[in-house]
Structure formats: C-alpha cells, structure tokens
Image (cartoon, helix red, strand yellow):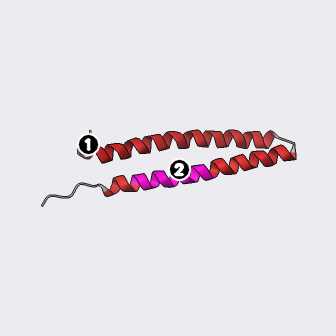
Amino acid sequence: MKTKKLVNRIRAIFDQDLRNNQQLQLSLNEVLEKLRLKQKKLQAEFERECNASCREALQLKIDLVHSQRKKGIAMLRQAQADAGDRKPAADA
C-alpha cells in the first residue's frame, strides 16, 4: 500500500469529521445508485407505455427522480470538496 493511502487511512481513524464525511459520501453513493436504477426502470416503462396519460405521469416521475439525483450529486461533490479541504498542514 502506498504511503499516501496509509496516511489517509490513519487520518480517517483519528479525525472524526473526516470519518463522518466519508460515511456521508458512502451513503450518498448508495442512494444515487438506487435513484439511477429507478430512473432507468421508469424510462424503460415510459418507452413501453402507449397510453398518453400514463406516459405523462411517468414523465413527471422521471423528472422528479432526475432532479433528486442532481441534488444528490451536488451534495456529493460538496462533501468531496470538504474532504479535500481538510488536507493536513505541511510541517516545515
């Protein structure tokens, strides 16, 4: 294992905020994956549907899931940026 990776793991052990941030990122990834699969399922259902009113309802659901995914991705990027900001100070 590389030195940088070892240092990051040790930092995660001792830094509660970093550990919480990593847990947040993991949970966001799980939720985003579920939303992505749900959106794909709805999109496939939309393609098969012939009834116009059902297609309209499905399109609303697809739009809702898409907007939730966009918000989740924004939250994930913010969490990753916060984790990146917590770099250890270089000792001179």
SS at circle 2: helix
Mark before the other along the chain sequence, 2 or 1: 1
Q: Main secondary structure of the magenta part?
A: helix
Q: In the rendered view of the protein, which quadrant contains the N terminus?
A: top left
Against 91, is 32 above or below?
Answer: above
Q: Residue furthest bottom?
A: 92
Residue span colored magenta: 67-80
Q: Is residue 48 left or right of residue 34?
A: right
Is-magenta flag for residue 72?
A: yes
Residue designated by label 1: 2
Which residue occupies 25% across, 47% down? 4
Residue at the (82%, 40%) spot, across then down: 49
**Residue furthest left as drawn:** 92
In the image, taking residue 14 as reference, residue 29 lies left or right, namely: right
- Which of the two marks, 2 or 1, is nearer to us in this view? 2
Residue 52 image point, x, y percent:
86, 47
Q: Please tell me whether residue 88 is drawn above or below residue 12 in the rendered image.
A: below
Give residue 8's position: percent from left, percent from top.
27, 45
> Which labelled disc corresponds to residue 52?
none
The amino acid type, in three-letter code, at marker 2 is: Gly
What type is the residue that disc 1 sits on? Lys
Which corner quadrant of the image does residue 81 belong to? bottom left
* Pointer 1 local density, CA inside 10 Å: few below 14, some 14–19, many at least 20: few
Q: Residue at x 78, y 46 (%)?
A: 57
Depicted 33 relative to depicted 83: above or below: above
The residue that mark 2 highlights is 72
The answer to if 79 sits in the magenta stretch is yes
Q: Position of residue 2 (x, y in %)?
A: 26, 42
- In the rendered image, the quadrant that contains the C terminus is bottom left
Q: Secondary structure at mark 1?
A: loop
